[in-house]
C-alpha cells in the first residue's frame, strides 16, 4: 500500500483497514477461470445466464447501458437495497431524494475543480441544440444537486451535521466502442448506486463518523461473502481535486480484472468552498467539512458472475440466492402432504420458488429451469407407495442427486 504521496492522512485513516474474512461457505461456486484473454466470451456467457435465469436482459435494447431488469433481478436487487438501507439507517444516515435532471448552472462550481467536457448528457429540443443552448443535464453523481441544496440550508453550526443517503442513478457518456454485452457492470451502475453525503463543522467532528462509515461499508461487503480488497487510493490514481483521501473496495473478477464496488471519500472543504456551504462562527464564515461514499448493486451482480459453473448455471450460494429451494411435485404426489411441506419450509424462513405439479415427462425440464435461475437446491416429490413419498434432491452447483 502506497501512502507516501499524502502530505498527512486524515485521522480516520490511521485505523486498520477492513480485513478480508473467510466466508465459511462450503458451497461449490463456479470455478471457471478462463484468464484475461477470454474476457469477452465470459461476459457474453454471463449475459446469456442472466437472461436465461430471468435476471437481466442486456441484449434486446441495442444501446450501451440499456438493460431490462427481469423478475429475479428485481427480487435480487430489492434484497440488496433492503440490506444497504438497513445498514445505512443503523449508522444514522437518513434517506433523501434528488432529481437526476439538473440545470447546467449547478455544475458551474464543479467545473472550477475539474473539467466536465464530454462528461455530461445534455438535454434539450432540436432547436435548443441548434442554438447551442441545452436546457439541462443528467447528473453523473450527486454532488451538484446535493451541495447546491446545502448552500441554502446551512447558515449556522446548529444546522449541522447533515448525514443523508439516496439511491442514485448515474448518467455518464461512454466511448464509441462500448457494447451492451461487455458493459453489463457499467450498465447496472447507472442505477442502484447507494451514495451517502455528510456535512460537518470540522474534521474533528467528521473523523469518528468516517471511521464508522468505513466499518459500515465493510459490513455490507462481508455480508455478501465476496473477496473484496480494500486500499487507500494513491492520489495520482484518483481525482485528487475531489477528495483528500479515498478508501476504496475492489472486487476481483474471474477474468483477471477488478471492479470497484464501494468507496469512502474525505472531501474536506474542497466542495464546500466552491458551493459556499458555510456557517457563522465567532463572526467568521467557516466552510463545512464533507464526507461522501457509496456502495453499488454491482456487489449483488458480481455474486452471480462468480457463481457460474462449467455447465453455465448460476450456482448461487444459498444465503444470497433469490430462491433457496425449488419444490417440484409429480402429479401422483399427495397434494396435502406437499402443501404441508411448503408451509413448514416457509415458516422456517426458507425462500421457496413457486411450487409446481407436473407430469413425469416435464420434471427434468423443471429441474433444469430451477438451476438456470440459480436456485441452489431442487426437490422432486413423487409417490412410491401408499402413505410414502420419494424425494429426490438435486444440487445446482455440482448437479449431484
Image (spheres, rainbow, N blue to C red):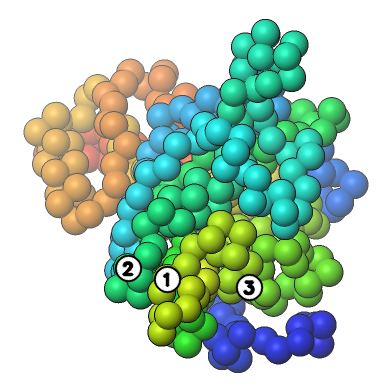
Separation of disc 2 and disc 3 at Cα? 27 Å
Looking at the image, tell me whether mark 2 or mark 1 is earlier in sequence order: 2
**Residue 361 place in picture, x, y as percent:** 41, 18
The disc placed on residue 247 is 3
Looking at the image, tell me whether mark 1 or mark 3 is earlier in sequence order: 3
Q: Which residue carries the number 1 mark?
A: 279
SS for callout 1: strand
SS for callout 3: strand
**Residue 99 place in picture, x, y as percent:** 45, 37
Looking at the rendered image, the disc whose residue lies closer to the viewer, 2 or 3, is 2
* Residue 262 appearing in the image: no
Q: Height in image: 42 above or below 13?
A: above
Give yes or no for contact between labels 2 and 3 (Cβ–Cβ under 8 Å).
no
Give yes or no for contact between labels 2 and 1 (Cβ–Cβ under 8 Å).
yes
**Residue 215 place in picture, x, y as percent:** 47, 77
Q: Residue at x 64, y 51 (%)?
A: 109
- Image quadrant where one finds the N terminus: bottom right
Looking at the image, tell me whether mark 2 or mark 3 is earlier in sequence order: 2
- The local crowd at label 3, few if under 14, some if 14 to 19, many if 20 or more residues have their Cα within 10 Å, is some
Q: Residue at x 85, y 44 (%)?
A: 38
Separation of disc 1 and disc 3 at Cα? 28 Å
Q: Which residue reaches farthest top?
A: 127
Looking at the rendered image, the disc whose residue lies closer to the viewer, 2 or 1, is 1
Q: Height in image: 333 above or below 374?
A: above
Looking at the rendered image, the disc whose residue lies closer to the viewer, 1 or 3, is 1
Q: Nearer the viewer, residue 95 or 117?
A: 117
Separation of disc 2 and disc 1 at Cα? 9 Å
Q: Nearer the viewer, residue 62 or 224?
A: 62
SS for callout 2: helix
Q: Which residue reaches farthest front?
A: 283
Q: Which residue carries the number 2 mark?
A: 159
Amino acid at each position: 500500500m502506497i501512502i507516501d504521496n499524502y502530505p498527512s492522512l486524515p485521522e480516520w485513516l490511521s485505523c486498520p483497514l477492513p480485513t478480508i474474512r473467510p466466508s465459511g461457505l462450503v458451497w461449490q461456486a463456479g470455478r471457471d477461470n478462463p484468464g484475461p484473454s477470454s474476457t469477452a466470451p465470459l461476459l457474453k456467457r454471463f449475459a446469456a445466464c442472466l437472461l436465461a435465469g430471468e435476471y437481466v436482459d442486456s441484449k434486446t435494447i441495442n444501446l450501451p447501458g440499456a438493460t431490462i431488469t427481469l423478475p429475479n433481478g428485481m427480487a435480487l436487487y430489492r434484497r440488496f437495497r433492503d440490506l444497504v438501507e438497513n445498514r445505512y439507517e443503523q449508522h444514522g444516515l437518513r434517506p433523501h431524494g434528488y432529481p437526476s435532471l439538473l440545470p447546467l448552472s449547478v455544475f458551474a462550481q464543479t467545473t472550477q475543480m475539474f473539467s466536465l467536457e464530454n462528461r455530461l448528457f445534455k438535454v434539450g429540443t432540436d432547436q435548443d441544440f441548434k442554438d447551442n443552448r441545452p436546457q439541462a443535464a443528467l447528473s453523473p453523481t450527486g454532488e451538484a444537486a446535493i451541495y447546491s441544496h446545502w448552500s441554502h440550508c446551512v447558515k449556522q453550526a446548529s444546522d449541522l451535521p447533515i448525514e443523508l443517503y439516496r439511491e442514485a442513478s448515474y448518467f455518464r457518456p461512454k466511448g464509441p466502442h462500448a457494447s451492451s454485452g461487455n458493459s453489463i457492470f457499467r450498465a447496472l451502475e447507472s442505477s442502484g448506486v447507494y451514495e451517502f453525503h455528510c456535512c460537518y463543522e470540522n474534521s474533528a467532528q467528521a473523523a469518528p463518523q468516517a471511521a464508522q462509515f468505513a466499518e459500515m461499508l465493510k459490513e455490507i461487503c462481508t455480508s455478501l461473502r465476496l473477496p473484496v480488497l480494500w486500499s487507500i487510493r494513491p492520489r495520482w490514481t484518483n481525482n485528487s481535486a475531489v477528495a483528500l483521501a479515498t478508501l476504496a473496495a475492489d472486487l476481483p473478477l474471474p477474468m483477471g480484472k477488478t471492479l470497484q464496488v464501494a468507496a469512502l471519500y474525505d472531501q474536506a472543504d474542497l466542495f464546500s468552498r466552491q458551493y459556499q456551504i458555510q456557517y457563522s462562527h465567532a463572526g467568521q464564515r467557516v466552510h463545512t467539512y464533507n464526507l461522501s461514499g457509496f456502495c453499488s448493486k454491482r456487489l449483488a451482480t458480481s455474486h452471480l458472475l462468480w457463481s457460474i459453473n462449467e455447465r453455465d448455471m448460476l450456482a448461487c450460494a444459498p444465503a444470497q440466492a433469490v430462491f433457496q429451494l425449488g419444490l417440484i411435485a409429480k402429479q401422483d404426489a399427495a397434494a396435502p402432504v406437499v402443501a404441508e411441506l411448503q408451509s413448514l419450509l416457509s415458516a422456517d424462513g426458507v425462500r421457496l420458488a413457486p411450487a409446481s405439479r407436473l407430469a413425469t415427462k416435464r420434471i427434468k425440464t423443471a429441474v433444469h429451469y430451477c438451476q438456470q435461475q440459480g436456485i441452489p437446491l431442487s426437490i422432486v416429490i413423487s409417490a412410491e407407495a401408499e402413505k410414502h413419498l420419494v424425494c429426490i434432491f438435486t444440487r445446482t452447483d455440482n448437479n449431484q442427486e
